[in-house]
Amino acid sequence: MKWIFIGSIIAMFLTALFSGQVSYVHVPRLFPYLLLFLFARGLMYLTKLLKLYKKGPLHSIPHFTKNAENTRITGMIDFVLEQRYKDMIS
């Protein structure tokens, strides 16, 4: 969500710059370099995403083990408390 907002702000500034509303910046010299930078940045981001998606889900196994450990600890606490209260009630 953050990147969508940042991208829309950048698009707004670029539109104002290249439409001629900002007259003190000489656009024709900067335009090819800006496009090259944006293309390279987008290509690096796309490569990073493709590598990440090839690996598959990263958080499923640690999340499962964490939940299993919490369930085991909760079960042990419940067992100890039940035993203690059974002795107190009986």
Image (cartoon, rainbow, N blue to C red):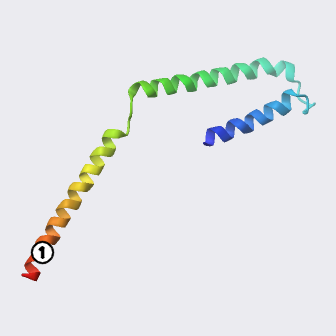
Relative image position of residue 48 (x, y in whole percent): 51, 26
Q: How many marks?
A: 1
Relative image position of residue 71 (x, y in whole percent): 24, 55
Side of 75 where 61 appears, left or right: right
> What residue does disc 1 label?
84
Side of 50 where 75 appears, left or right: left
Relative image position of residue 53 (x, y in whole percent): 44, 27
Residue at 14% of width from left, 71% of height from top? 82
The amino acid sitting under disc 1 is Arg
Side of 1 where 10 appears, left or right: right
Quadrant location of the N terminus? top right
Relative image position of residue 74 (x, y in whole percent): 23, 61
Side of 75 where 50 appears, left or right: right
Q: Quadrant of residue 38?
A: top right
Residue at 17% of width from left, 71% of height from top? 81
Residue 51 to residue 81: above or below: above
Residue 23 to residue 77: above or below: above
Q: Secondary structure at mark 1?
A: helix
Quadrant location of the C terminus? bottom left
